[in-house]
Image (cartoon, rainbow, N blue to C red):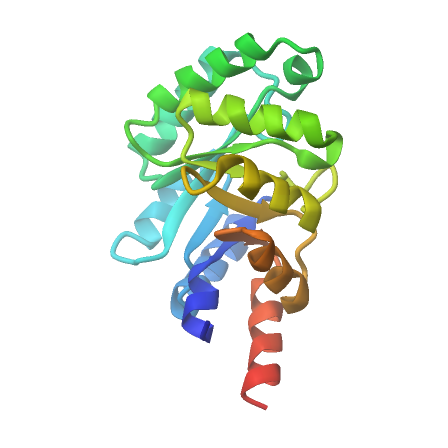
Amino acid sequence: MDRKELASKIEHAFLKPDAEIGVIERGCRAAEEAGIGAVVVQPCHVRAVSSLLESSPTKVVAVIGFPMGGTYTEAKVLEARMAVEEGADELDLVMNLSLFASGRYQEVQEDLEKVIQASHGRPVKVILETSLWDEGAIVKGCHIARDAGASFVKSSTGFFGGAEEWSVRLMRKTVGNRMGVKASGGIKDLSKMLAMLSAGADRIGTSSTFEILDQWDKRFKG
């Protein structure tokens, strides 16, 4: 894997509550120049970021139902539909964590299905928040996301603990080659990113993109 391929696997997150639009726009330009695969933003920033990256290979990802997934299904459907209309290439959707914890799995799946249907064919990554669950629950979450029609399963929002090698490996084992796996949360250096890729992740969500690329340059170009 070379630096270009490494960069293409990164989805740079602009999800801090106090992230200013000017900072986000400058970060998007830097991400584009670095060949980053995608930027991840709150829905309110999709229009501006999509316009900025209109002719860029760097994709725009909108988070939906973020960060707990507990809002009304209809609200998430509207959020997804508007994000797509305003230029989102992909959606990162938080499953309803409270309903999942309550064992109301059919409701969780129906919620996901309706939002995925509103995505108009855009790839949807379902965020499981793996740090909350044991192995059996993670497997169940993967199956629900798969049956709902998701393209990826994603480990974490980054607000409640991050990705761990064992859980990423379990996600990959569970979904096989039928779905993608995105690891996110707490991935702050090159060593952890490489460990997540080795565990089976296809994509890496991080806000430490440029630190990781600097570490790559020092390790392989120094």
Q: Residue at x 67, y 42 (%)?
A: 167
Q: Is residue 73 visible?
A: yes
Q: Is residue 18 visible?
A: no
Q: Residue at x 50, y 15 (%)?
A: 109
Q: Residue at x 61, y 84 (%)?
A: 218
Residue 84 falls in image quadrant: top left
User: How far across and how far down the image is residue 116, in percent?
Assistant: 39, 23
User: How far across and how far down the image is residue 144, in percent?
Assistant: 52, 21
Q: Is residue 51 left or right of residue 19?
A: left
Quadrant location of the C terminus?
bottom right
Residue situated furthest left in the rendering:
55
Q: Is residue 8 left or right of residue 67?
A: left
Q: Is residue 153 above or below residue 145?
A: below
How many numbered marks have been drawn onto this rendered protein structure? Answer: 0
Q: Is residue 62 above or below residue 8?
A: above
User: How far across and how far down the image is residue 190, in percent?
Assistant: 63, 68
Q: Is residue 55 above or below residue 45?
A: below
Residue 102 falls in image quadrant: top right
The front one of 197 and 6 is 197
Residue 55 falls in image quadrant: bottom left
User: How far across and how far down the image is residue 128, in percent?
Assistant: 61, 31
Q: Residue at x 56, y 63 (%)?
A: 209
The front one of 47 and 40 is 40
The front one of 55 and 189 is 189
